[in-house]
Amino acid sequence: MESITKNRQSPEVLRTMIERAYGAGQVPTGDGWAEELGHGWFNVAYRIRLRDGADVVLKIAPPPHVEVMTYERGAMSIELRTLDLIRTHTSVPVPDVHFADQSHELCDADYFFMPYIDADNLGIISAQLPAAERDACMEQLGAANREINSIRGTGFGPLAGPHDPSWRRVFTGIVEDVLADGERRCVDIGWEYDTVRAVVAEHAAALDEVTEPRLVEWDLWDGNVMVRDGKIACIIDHERAFYGDPLIEAGFTGTQMSAFGDATPFLRGYGQAEPTGTEQVRRRLYCLHLMLIMVIETVFRGHTDTKQYDWARTRLDEAMALLGRTRR
């Protein structure tokens, strides 16, 4: 996936990064030792073969001159913190961090190295899998997501703080950041921005039901799941985590919006019953938030075609309709 946020580096710079992380003896020579992994949407990632033949992955944050959305600032620091939390408190398989550098001495952004996961990306192969096998993977994902959500925070909001005891205040602030990003870049979302604000305010009381902050991934869709022999081998890309309501997780989106697929296998693995009325309202607010991001981020990413924008605009109308607003 092409995006102006991808901070590509020259072979010479990559070699200096490798030397800092693994030592001069592991710096590769010749050609063909670095390959960009192209399916990511935000960071650039390289598969690198070290001199001893070991394969690792180098992930580099966006360059500082590229404007990202408010919630994406400091994303790599969030990922490193999340990886540590998941490794420490759960049995969910996530990558080890071989080396992380936030000094900006060798390049203009944070980066880290991790092992290469020899497995298939579920988001890429899912269409070719038998339905029963794909459902089994999504059921495993539901169970893993529940385990991640078992990690409790001291308040709602960013992992590093500040924390707030009110989920309503935190979530409405998150939505406001997205709307402000869109307004600043003059993104046409198909609705008056203040109309969206009014819809969120009308339903915000449903958020008060959430009183216990939990670690949520938010971006845990099948494209961030690596599978091998029908089992989850690793979950990757943890840069959007925060303490919030587990119902905001990506696996629940399909309970309200059919375009995101059948959520039944995920719900079965998670152990989630059918949502109550208030839970449905919360999930619909979370759908609205997601679709706002998917529309607005196309401008920040510098997309050269309108495929995602057009798709997300339609879904945004659906999300507004779920909350009682339709076009006249």
Image: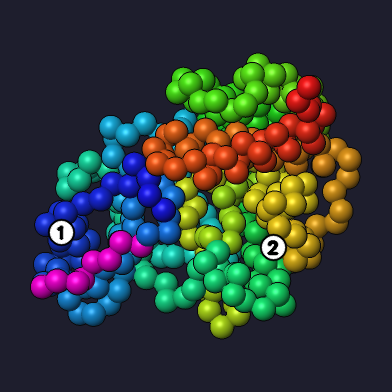
Label 1 or label 2, whichever lies nearer to me, is 1
Query: Which of the 4 quarters of the picture holds residue 105?
Result: top left
- State yes or no: residue 35 in magenta: yes
- Judging from the image, what secondary structure is the residue with disc 2 in? helix
Image location of residue 175, percent across then percent down = 61, 29
Task: Tell me the number on the disc at residue 11.
Answer: 1
| Image point (21%, 51%), residue name | 9
Residue 81 visible to the viewer: no
Q: Which residue matches tag 2?
A: 142
Farthest residue, direction top: 194
Image location of residue 52, percent across then percent down = 20, 79
What amino acid type is highlighted by mark number 2?
Answer: Gly
Q: Magenta segment range?
A: 30-37
| Image point (51%, 20%), residue name | 183
Q: Earlier in the sequence, mark 1 or mark 2?
A: 1
Above or below, comparing residue 166 to residue 269 in the picture: above
Left/right placement of residue 111 relative to residue 50 reads right
